Image (cartoon, rainbow, N blue to C red):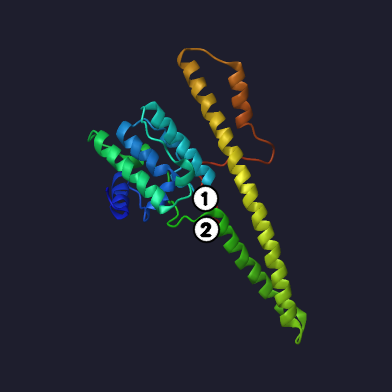
């Protein structure tokens, strides 16, 4: 039936020199990309975000994996929508397939995983939970803390009733804001994935043209639009540490 999740995590840690504790962490896509790279040594690991913490980053990693599958004519569907949810069973089944593929195709060559990813950090969160429930939970805690801080204002007799009413009102507002934020995050991820697809197509076509000594002004204009920024906006540094306020 294949290796257990414990055996697979140990294998991934040994092969890639990472420190994963759960098979769910592979849902970020980075480990899958580097397993394929260990076989063929042609995955653009500099573009793989090994310490990805957000679903749109997971999706970008899986786009790279899909390109690698196509390049090597690997006829295996990648269930991206399931894997990026970081559920145990989905990632266990896919990693079992990856391990069988690796056993069949790895040539036994020397492989330095740290050098291949240029020493990029791999501090994937030990526990990856769905973003929306996590944000709702932390939001509720924040609301409770703020409401508790206002308890004395209501006076001695009616303070408790007023505090409860204020707390309920704040919690209702937080739930509404959380639902709205969840919708915005989904919309952001949806459009990011589309832009990422366009970027990859343009980049592949540009590389093909450059290899033939040709150029396409239209593609360059599209690429310029994709990479343009506005005043006050900076493109995040891929090597920069994640926001310390992010918790998992």
- The one of 143 and 187 positioned closer to us in this rendering: 187
- Residue 151 position, x and y percent, is 71, 78
Q: Looking at the image, which residue sits at the far top?
A: 213
* Residue 20 position within the rendered picture, expressed as x and y whole percent measured from the top left: 37, 53
- Point out which mark residue 71 bears: none
Residue 7 % position (x, y): 28, 52
- Secondary structure type for disc 2: loop
Q: Measuring 73% from the left and 74% from the top, which residue is drawn there?
A: 165
In the displayed structure, 81 sits above or below 67; it is below
Q: Name the residue under label 1.
A: 242
Q: Distance between the residues labelled 2 and 1?
A: 10 Å
Give the residue number, with chain letter if any, for mark 2.
247
Q: Position of residue 21 (x, y in %)?
A: 36, 56
Sequence-earlier tag: 2 or 1: 1
Q: Residue 44 occupies which quadrant of the picture? A: top left
Q: Residue at x 41, y 52 (%)?
A: 24
Which residue reaches farthest left? 108
Q: Answer left or right for 21 relative to 146.
A: left
Q: Would you identify the image quadrant in which residue 246 lies?
A: bottom right
Res. 159 in view: yes
Whether residue 106 is visible to the viewer of this picture, yes or no, is: no
Give the residue at x 70% y 71%: 168
**Which mark is in front, 2 or 1?**
2
């Amino acid at each position: 039936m294949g290796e257990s999740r414990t055996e697979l995590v140990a294998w991934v840690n040994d092969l890639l020199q990472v420190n994963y504790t759960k098979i769910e962490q592979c849902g970020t896509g980075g480990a899958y990309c580097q397993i394929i790279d260990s076989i063929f040594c042609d995955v653009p690991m500099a573009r793989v975000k090994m310490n990805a913490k957000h679903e749109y980053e997971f999706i970008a990693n899986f786009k790279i994996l899909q390109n690698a599958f196509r390049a090597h004519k690997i006829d295996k569907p990648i269930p991206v929508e399931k894997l990026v949810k970081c559920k145990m069973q989905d990632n266990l089944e896919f990693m079992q397939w990856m391990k069988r593929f690796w056993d069949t195709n790895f040539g036994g060559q020397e492989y330095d995983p740290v050098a291949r990813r240029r020493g990029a950090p791999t501090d994937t969160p030990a526990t990856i939970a769905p973003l929306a429930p996590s944000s709702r939970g932390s939001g509720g805690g924040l609301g409770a803390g703020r409401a508790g801080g206002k308890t004395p204002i209501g006076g001695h007799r009616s303070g408790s009733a007023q505090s409860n009413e204020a707390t309920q009102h704040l919690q209702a507002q937080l739930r509404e804001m959380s639902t709205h934020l969840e919708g915005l995050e989904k919309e952001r991820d949806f459009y990011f994935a589309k832009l990422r697809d366009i970027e990859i197509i343009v980049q592949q076509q540009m590389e093909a043209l450059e290899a033939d000594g040709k150029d396409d002004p239209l593609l360059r204009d599209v690429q310029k639009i994709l990479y343009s920024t506005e005043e006050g906006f900076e493109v995040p540094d891929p090597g920069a540490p994640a926001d310390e306020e992010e918790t998992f």
